Image (cartoon, rainbow, N blue to C red):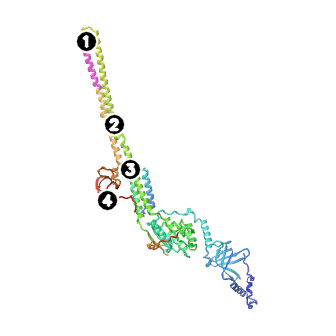
Amino acid sequence: MTRPPFDPNLIKTSADEVRPAFAATLTVTQLTQLIKRTLEERLPSTIQVIGQISNFKRHSSGHLYFVLKDERSELSCVMWRSDAVRLKFNATDGLEVIATGHIDLFERSGRYQLYARRIEPRGVGALELAFRQLRGKLENEGLFDPTRKCALPRFPRRIAVVTSLDGAALRDILQTLLRRFPCVDVLVYPVAVQGPSAAGEIASAVALLNANSDQLGGIDVIIVGRGGGSLEDLWAFNEEVVARAIFDSRIPVISAVGHETDVTISDLVADVRAATPTAAAELATPVRDELTSDLARTARLLLRHLTHAIALRRASLTAVCERSAIRRPLDVVQRRDEIVDDLNTRMQQGLINRMHHLHRKLGAMEITVLRIAPQAFTAQLRERIAAAEHRMERSVTRNVHHWERRLNDRAARFADIHPKRRWERLSDRIDQMTRRLEALSHNSVLRRGFTLTRLSRGRGLLRSPTQVRDGELIVTDTAGGSVESRVVNLKQMELFDGP
Amino acid sequence: MTEKPLTFEAALQRLEKLTVEIERGEIGLEDSITRYEEGMKLLDHCRQMLAAAEQRIQKLTANPDGTLNATDAPELGKSNRPAARDD
């Protein structure tokens, strides 16, 4: 695109004032100087021009060259590096801007140009635009990606705070940390939080904290922030260099800039955004008092579980003891004895019955013989019968003795030999079980150094100080024996409550 | 390399494990008591960590070689006027 050639008509109005001396033929330089002077005299020293940027070029020297144009005209523009560095947003082709500067003539090429000192985007503020541009750029690069964010440690030991020494932010952070979690170490890294050097200082602080974390004993969290202020005041936290330093930080970063409503690039890129510096300190730490009572609760829980585990064992011990083999080991033997006795009784009774039966039969025979036989046979018969009776009696007696012996033998087998062996086996098993149960009993706990304290006069175990009074006797069982002692100092307290 | 003292977080994790093991009752009584004792030691360790320090504040200054100096700065934590809430 060619720039429009210098058109003398544009300064036609000045021509009336040109002194007659110059009405004659002029050198190019003379004319150019005339035009230059005319421009200086006739145009205000500061001009604001609205136009669309085109042909934008950033020279390696840092100077900006571009053209401002509207539907009908174009204007060459220059912005020197010294002004260009203050430009927050990226000027790009097509952007509607208001450029502020002055018009001057570049004598060597005879061109006039706008020397812009400031460029403002039209419609939105420059900072606003810059914020949007950087946010878009970093978002595309993935700097705000939620999956790249680190979780904060639950129990930090060392927190670094990057902020100004003068601000309310530092005081708020330190006081909040002291209130919630005074056992944390705080490393304060003083930086400027506004002004031209602020962004660089903040970025370098974050980088140096990362680099020196180990030497400083390990930093768990970095809080970067400041109190409230205008958008310009907070601007350092919208600078790319700060965003990149935070993104590169291996240590989790909490960004706490300004008020609830202020959102900065630093907030977006940080691992956690806190609405205020106070909130940052709250996010970084647990409450110590809560932790202490959590620990007390854990202690009670542990004790309850252990007590329960012991109670379970005691219950199974009781269950084993309840079983008949242990409670009445003689039952089995005694039952066998009963059977033997019963058999013996029944057999003797059977023999006696049989004898009585034979007696009755004999008596009947005697009567029959006496009735049918003649008198002569009587004496002889009586004799034979008596002999038979005697034999029979002897045989029965022998029989009885025989049965008695056999019964006694069998009884002896049950009552003597067999039951004895059985008893020995049983008592072996009982011994074994006793040993196994003993291992589970409180005696083994005593051997490990625990003691049982009993109340005097057989009133059971001491489980709470409320059961005794000062001066009362208590008995402590240890593995080696018992100790009797007197209560001198009663303390009733919750287990592990309070530091 | 010396053994680092257990961090608060690690101690809490171990405690949780011990508690669950004792609670489940799958381990023997002796093991339960061993775990109980370990748990009590851990609890003590945690309580000491919490109780130990009062707030220590240090100020950092950067050296030209990129290292940092830490100096105690308790005065930063002492404020004569009430903190201006910035929210």
Range of the magenta residues? Answer: A385-403
Q: Secondary structure at mark 2?
A: helix
Marks 2 and 4 on same chain: yes
Q: Where is mark 2, residue-wise?
A: A331
Q: Residues within 10 Å of mark 1 (few under 14, many from 20)?
A: some
The type of residue carrying mark 1 is Leu
Mark closer to the chain start, 1 or 2: 2
**In the rendered image, the vertical position of residue A389 relative to residue A64, given as above or below:** above
Alpha carbon of mark 2 to alpha carbon of mark 4: how far?
Answer: 53 Å
Number of the label disc, if any, that sits on residue A381? 1
Quarter of the picture holding the N terminus of chain B: bottom left
Pinpoint the chain carrying mark 3: A
Q: Is residue A187 magenta?
A: no
**In the rendered image, the vertical position of residue B58 relative to residue A379, given as above or below:** below
Residue A217 visible, this orientation: no
Pinpoint the chain carrying mark 1: A
Number of the label disc, if any, that sits on residue A489? 4
Mark closer to the chain start, 1 or 4: 1
Alpha carbon of mark 1 to alpha carbon of mark 2: how far?
Answer: 58 Å
- The residue depicted at 35 percent of the width and 54 percent of the height is A464
Mark closer to the chain start, 2 or 4: 2
Q: Is residue A387 magenta?
A: yes
The type of residue carrying mark 2 is Asp
**Residue found at the far bottom of this picture:** A21
| Foreground residue among A446 and A403 | A446
Number of the label disc, if any, that sits on residue A310? 3
Alpha carbon of mark 3 to alpha carbon of mark 4: how far?
Answer: 29 Å
Residue A111 picture quarter:
bottom right
Pinpoint the chain carrying mark 2: A
Q: Residues within 10 Å of mark 2 (few under 14, many from 20)?
A: few
